[in-house]
Image (cartoon, grey):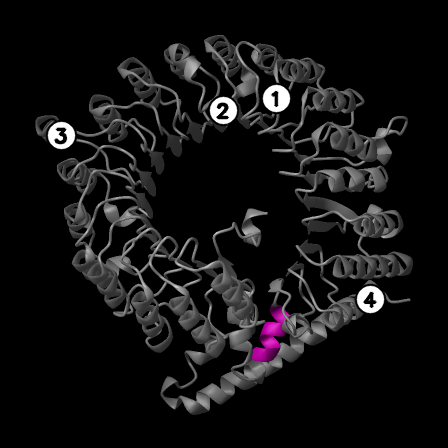
Amino acid sequence: MVEVGDIQAQQEAIRNVVKARSNKFIRRLSVAYPEQEGDLLSRIRVSTMMRVAEYCDVTTQNILSSVNKYFNSLIRTTRTTADINCQPGWVDAINRSPFLKTIALWRESTPEDTKRFCRIVKNDGFPELTDMKLVYMDDNSLHMILSALNTKINRSLRLNIMSPSFTAGVTIAVYDVSQRLCYAFAEAAQESLCHVLGRFKLITSDIDGVENFFKTVDFSGFSLLDEIVLSSCPLQRRGFEFFIRSMWPEGLSGSSLAPVRILRLDDCQIHNSGMVSLTQVMRRGLFANLEVFDISSNKISEKGIRLLGETLRGFACPKLKVLNLTDNFISVGNLVPLFDALAEGACPLLSEIEFGHTGISEEDLAAFTRFMLTPNAENVSRVNFSNNPQITGALPAFFKALQGSPCESIKTLLMEGVSFSLVEVQALTEWLLSGKAAQLKAMVLRSNLLDEESFCLLLNTLINPKCPRISVIDFSSNLIGSFKEERWLQLLAQDGEEVFFEQIDYGFNPLTDNDMRLFLMFMSRFSPLERTARVGFASNLISAETLSYYFRALPDGPCCLNFLAIDSCSIQGCGRYLYEFLSTDASRNLTSLSLRDCGLTKEDVFLLLDGFDKQVCTKLLSLRLDGNPSIDDSFVSRFIVSYGERSSFPNLSRLDAGYTEIDADGVMTLIDFLKENQGIRLQSIDFTSIKVTSEEKGMLKGEMENCYSVHLSLWRVCWETVSSNRSFSSL
């Protein structure tokens, strides 16, 4: 029998080998660079290098592994996460990486590679593995991997070498849920997964398949399953009933069923009948551990919500912290029973509540206000009542009540799509200055019909010493513009505290160049621009002149700016300003630049690339230039020079150049470059709706399939159809 101590001893032996090799590497460097006298290099500890290796993505890890034997060993033995596109040879990218905790496999794999991976898994490879993500793989690979995991877990259980606290996570994303997949998962579930599975996520659009899946798989024996994510799975009525029966069948005790802590059922096409089934489970005491309950974007109406309120009143979910009801058909007055239940203490730990876009009325907000006046609301930190235009009249009372509320922990307030007149804005500012909003960090006032007067009142409040230090604020899609200079000069003459906006968005407003000049004067006076990380001023009435104002206002040295979006603005002739900005240290931390649909001239685009060639802005990850007709094949050639020859974009992973004049020749030029440079970091290329015929499209897609490198975790070319290869962060 293999003891746990033996495994730990093996791991310690591996660490000792890595340490010895690292020391040897340091000695070698000391000989190569004697001027350092070993002082600096002696500080390169193996633990530090291990942390560096863990931080790097798979592509960079593989590049480092080719430096020498030391780095090769280090990368392979310290990697904890692998996100791999299953092109031929992908097993070699993760083989001999014993500390992997998460493995994400994308797309179809060859039978040979799948067999090799399964052999490693069956032979006790990846002893630290806790999460397996299988994303759009072929049916045969899914079946083989699930069988291998079943064998691995069974052996560990038989030999009693698995920690009692060990839990595993499985994510499966498929286009079609086949019967073979259902049987394979059901077998693994019955034999081994029921003992260890703690996190399960299913991603599919197959209506019949998801119904058959829960009809086949019995989840009732999963005693450790505390997180279930079925976001965007089309359960509908029948599928949801099978899901309920699979998870919580009638007649079984609560101790033997999954102690669910997180349940995400957003966008699952659930109706009121689904809420009937869910509340029945709640009444059986099976949601006593539930902390996160997300049923947003479904088809639940007043009957279902009223039933939920009645059920919660019986303390069915005493540990609930997050409740998301957004985007359901609740309508006028039907949230009152739910809020009354909360006021009575049904969920005393509630910290986040979202009921945006539910069609509620002033009566509902009044009931929520009563809840906020009770001690049971003292933990609330996030409130979202966006896109409920009928609640406007109740807002002053709501903000006034907050001044006397036991709740002083609100950090995020989302109020998008609710009309604010000067009366509502004044009530909001009084709460901001009352001391009860001291924890507020983010406020969304998008599409609130704010005008200049309301905007200035808010700005005057924000610089007041009594106002909380809000770091994220969104003023986009309002009526802010046509500024009166006298009003702004008075504002600038005020004494006030500095505010540090980490993120600010004032796009989609009728702001002119003069308006932006005045606003940037305010920002320069009260909010140091070097502290702002994310800025958006898309779809304003500005010209290139505004960019000159903004870039001149930035400091000469490094600043925090990492995201800049100037989409849908007529900024022809801005190239020289972009060039100057990219040539200074102010651009050093920029990771995302979006200039979509800005009417850029060819000269602007080339000056932009010239600016990147200064190699100051080397951290750029995303460059979006789609919707600029001046971009054609010459841009592709010039981009390759900057990217390949001059290494101006060493970290670039996303390039968007769709809706431009690039044609098949330009795409082919880029493909040829990619074939010759397989170790680069570019992962996403968007050429949506370029000048490519159907025949050329098929040819180019075939060429792209042949130029992928195993060193890259994901390549994606978006054609006129929507790409199904989504980034893993969105799953």
Q: Position of residue 346 (x, y in %)?
A: 65, 17
Q: Earlier in the sequence, mark 1 or mark 3?
A: 1
* Mark 2 nearby-residue class (10 Å; few <14, some 14–19, many ≥20): many
Which span is picked out in magenta?
71-78
Q: Quadrant of residue 7?
A: bottom right
User: Which numbered circle lies on residue 348?
Assistant: 1
Residue at 45% x, 19% y: name it: 388
Badge 4 marks a residue whose secondary structure is: helix
Q: Is residue 73 left or right of 599 when viewed as pictured?
A: right
**Circles 1 and 4: CB distance less than 8 Å?**
no
Image quadrant containing the N terminus? bottom right
Badge 2 marks a residue whose secondary structure is: loop
- The residue at which mark 2 appears reads as 356
User: Which numbered circle lies on residue 122?
Assistant: 4
User: Which numbered circle lies on residue 488?
Assistant: 3
Q: Position of residue 19 (x, y in %)?
A: 60, 77
Q: Is residue 333 left or right of 238 when viewed as pictured?
A: left
Residue at 76% x, 51% y: name it: 166
